[in-house]
Amino acid sequence: MGELRDLLRKSGYSEKAADFYLNRVNVGELSDANAYAIYTGPCGDTMEFFLKVEDSTIRDASFQAIGCAGSFAAGAAFVELIRGKTLEEAERVEEDRVVEFLGTIPVQKIHCACLAKRTLRKALAAYRGVPFQLPECKKVEEAW
Ligand code: FES
């Protein structure tokens, strides 16, 4: 495990991002979820988001991914950032907030945060019963 952590650090992942990936933080199905979405991004990786919503507030959330270390770090960060927040607040979380929360991730992995953002937005749209509108990914320059 130590070697993998070193490799992640050398690639540009913060300690927190490496922890989230190595410990699979916030990964798994939420048995009492009342909102769900699955989305496959242009990179070919897939994410699922599970939300437990009550009174327009996200009481709990989790995710699963078939993806890279960046997708696990970003998915975990999104869950941390939206838990306890209103639907509107959750909808406003963008890639730059996630990168800021994580510390650093490799620049070429910011699109993985977009995979998480899109999957989350799709789950929020499903909860509201409205059509999912694919949000734009932030450009790398904008995200830093
Ligand atoms: Fe696809 Fe990271 S490369 S989510």
Image (cartoon, rainbow, N blue to C red):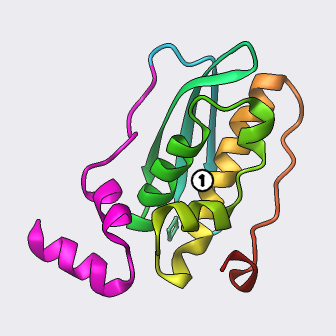
Numbered disc 1: secondary structure: helix
Depicted 99 relative to depicted 140: above or below: above
Task: Let me know if residue 41 appears in the view.
Answer: no
Q: Which residues are magenta?
A: 1-30
Q: Nearer the viewer, residue 126 or 2?
A: 2
Residue 45 locus on image (x, y percent): 52, 60
| Left or right: residue 79 compared with residue 38 | left
Quadrant including the N terminus: bottom left
> Is residue 112 covered in magenta?
no
Q: Residue at x 18, y 73 (%)?
A: 4
Which amino acid lies under the numbered mark 1 shown in the image of this protein? Answer: Ala
Q: Quadrant of residue 130?
A: top right
Name the residue beneath numbered marker 1: 116
Q: Residue at x 39, y 83 (%)?
A: 12
Residue 58 locus on image (x, y percent): 63, 26
| Left or right: residue 11 compared with residue 73 | left
Residue 126 locus on image (x, y percent): 76, 29
Q: Residue at x 75, y 20 (%)?
A: 56
Residue 52 locus on image (x, y percent): 58, 20
Depicted 97 relative to depicted 26: above or below: below
The secondary structure that most of the magenta stretch takes on is helix
Q: Going by the picture, which residue comes out furthest to the left?
A: 2
Task: Let me know if residue 8 appears in the view.
Answer: yes
